[in-house]
Image (tube, rainbow, N blue to C red):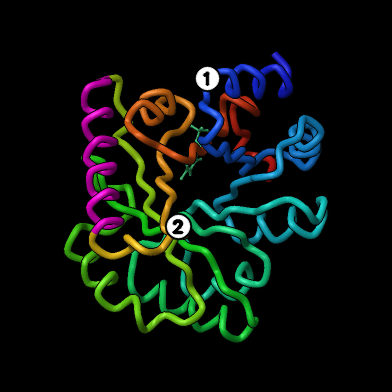
């Protein structure tokens, strides 16, 4: 199957209102150009250096999303052009994005990443950290909070994955009603990857992040 075939197959499973983010990390520029030729304009990367290099080399109308763990000292490199940061997992990171965005004269769109998986290794806030950040959101002048993101446990147990997505959707609805009822910009629920995006969509995802099913296995050796 070609990249074109893969994208067509995914599109056939996605409702029109669900945004596809093509996760191109570790894949070469040619692969991105191929997806671009199919009309895709939203690409996700998880390493700052790789994102900056691809942003410089590829068409200017691509909307670049950052989806990986972001270190505060690297925020300044992506803030000038990034269109959405999915992986904001601390108040400290949020304030650094705000500071750098102010310097650049931009408003930067962010999602708060929630820890919903059972694995220790996945990043994200717990509900206490989330509430603290939401209570202080008035201090942010250059960040727009657009929604929540989460990654389910890596498991074959569909019911567990479904339960985690359902919990995140419930939290999203509560946050929306409690803090952003009058703010249309808070409307993104980023959940679902290659192996679980169909479940995520059934549970209310508005944005899926898909890499392997579009581009094939990542080659971690040749970056
Ligand atoms: C790599 C990555 C994806 C894409 O994963 P696939 O299984 O290849 O679809 C999605 N979200 C995040 C946060 C990632 O790091």
Mark 2 or mark 1, whichever is nearer to me: 1
- Please, is residue 186 above or below residue 40 in the view? below
In the rendered view, would you say 168 is above or below 142? above
Is 24 a magenta residue? no
- State the residue in front, 20 or 209: 20
**Which residue sits at x=47%, y=62%?**
110
Circle 2 sits in a helix, a strand or a loop, which is it? loop
Lateral position of residue 113 relative to residue 98, left or right: left
In this image, 1 relative to 202: left or right? right
Residue under numbered circle 2: 69
Q: CA distance from mark 2 to mark 1?
A: 28 Å
Q: Quadrant of residue 136?
A: bottom left
10 vs 135: above or below: above
**Residue shown at the point (64%, 82%) measured from the top left:** 105
Q: Would you say 204 lies left or right of 14 here?
A: left
Coordinates of residue 153 in the picture (x, y in percent):
29, 35
Q: Which residue is mark 1?
A: 13
Query: In front: 222, or 134?
Result: 134
Location of the N terminus (image quadrant):
top right
Q: Position of residue 83 (x, y in %)?
A: 61, 59
Please report the bounds of the magenta region as a residue range.
157-177
User: Principal SS element in the magenta part?
Assistant: helix
Against 35, residue 156 (above or below) is: above
Q: Residue at x 57, y 24 (%)?
A: 213
Specify whether residue 158 is painted magenta: yes
Q: Residue sitting at 52 percent across and 35 percent down? A: 17
Of labels 2 and 1, earlier in sequence is 1
Q: Quadrant of residue 26?
A: top right
């Amino acid at each position: 199957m070609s990249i074109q075939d893969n994208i067509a197959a995914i599109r056939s499973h996605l409702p029109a209102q669900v945004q596809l983010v093509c996760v191109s990390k570790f894949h070469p520029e040619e692969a991105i150009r191929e997806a671009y030729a199919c009309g895709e304009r939203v690409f996700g990367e998880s390493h700052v250096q790789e994102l900056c290099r691809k942003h410089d080399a590829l068409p200017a109308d691509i909307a670049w999303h950052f989806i990986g763990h972001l270190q505060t000292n690297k925020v300044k490199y992506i803030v000038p052009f990034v269109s959405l940061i999915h992986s904001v997992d601390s108040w400290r990171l949020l304030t650094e994005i705000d500071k750098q965005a102010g310097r650049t004269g931009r408003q930067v769109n962010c999602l708060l990443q929630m820890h919903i998986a059972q694995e220790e290794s996945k990043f994200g806030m717990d509900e206490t950290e989330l509430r603290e950040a939401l209570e202080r959101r008035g201090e942010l002048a250059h960040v727009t909070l657009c929604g929540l993101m989460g990654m389910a446990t890596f498991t074959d147990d569909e019911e567990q994955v479904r339960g985690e997505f359902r919990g995140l959707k419930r939290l999203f609805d509560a946050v929306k009603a409690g803090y952003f009822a009058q703010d249309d910009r808070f409307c993104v629920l980023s959940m679902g990857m290659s192996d679980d995006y169909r479940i995520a969509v059934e549970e209310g995802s508005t944005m899926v992040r898909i890499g392997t099913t579009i581009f094939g296995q990542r080659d971690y050796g040749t970056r």
